[in-house]
Amino acid sequence: MLSGDKATDVQHRFLVDVVNEIADVIDDGTAKTQLGQILPLLDMYVEWHFEREEKCMFRRSCPYAYANERAHESFMTVVKRFRVRYQAEGGSQAMAEEMYHFMCDWLVNHIIKIDSTMRDYPDRTEKPY
């Protein structure tokens, strides 16, 4: 477990799957038509994951909790820009590549560096089995 929280890691795996989907549309040249289906997945991920993970970090008294919140806000801003751009211009290979690089950077510089700090701060509200 990367984050120390099983549910959080399942949600992170979903995001990895979305990044792999972006890679697939880049490889097969279908970005123009497929990005319209991928952007709602990112919106769903934000709604499903961010608030839950933020609460988990605060519950664990993780010192990175506020930085995590700010990073999530930044992520949402970038995804909104991609959505607005898609609505104005449609999908393109260049946009898919930008999204892919942004998401890969997020996986490395956010999930691996920030979210993984949760594992050092146990959730004291969970009941042991």
Image (cartoon, rainbow, N blue to C red):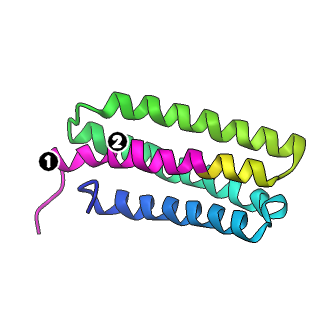
Determine crowd level at label 1: few under 14, some 14-19, many 20+ residues with C-alpha closer than 10 A. Answer: few
Q: Give the quarter of the figure containing the C terminus.
A: bottom left
Q: Nearer the viewer, residue 93 or 15?
A: 93
The magenta stretch is 101-129
Percent from the top left, x then y, of residue 76?
59, 37
Give how far apart the Cα atoms at labels 1 and 2 are.
Answer: 13 Å
Q: Is residue 28 magenta?
A: no
| Residue 8 percent location from the top left of the image | 36, 56
Q: Nearer the viewer, residue 94 or 122?
A: 94
> Residue shown at 44%/64% (left/top)?
13
Query: Chief secondary structure of the magenta span?
Result: helix
- Apparent side of residue 12 relative to residue 80 in the rendered image (left or right): left
Residue 45 shown left or right of residue 34 in the figure: left
Look at label 1 and name its amino acid. Arg
Would you identify the image quadrant in which residue 11 lies?
Answer: bottom left
Residue 80 is left or right of residue 70, and the answer is right
| Element marked by disc 1 | loop
The image quarter in which residue 117 lies: top left
Q: Where is residue 50 in the image (x, y as percent from the top left)?
A: 46, 45
Q: Nearer the viewer, residue 25 or 55?
A: 25
Viewer-closest of 48 and 42: 42
Q: In which quarter of the image is residue 1?
A: bottom left
Q: Mark 1 points at which residue?
A: 124
Residue at the spot of label 2:
55
Q: Which amino acid does label 2 sit on?
A: Lys
Residue drawn at the location 78% of the way across and 55% of the way down: 93
The x, y position of residue 87, in whole percent, is 85, 44
- Is residue 17 positioned above or below 54 on the image? below
Residue 121 sits inside the magenta stretch: yes
The numbered mark, 1 or 2, whose residue comes first in the sequence reads 2
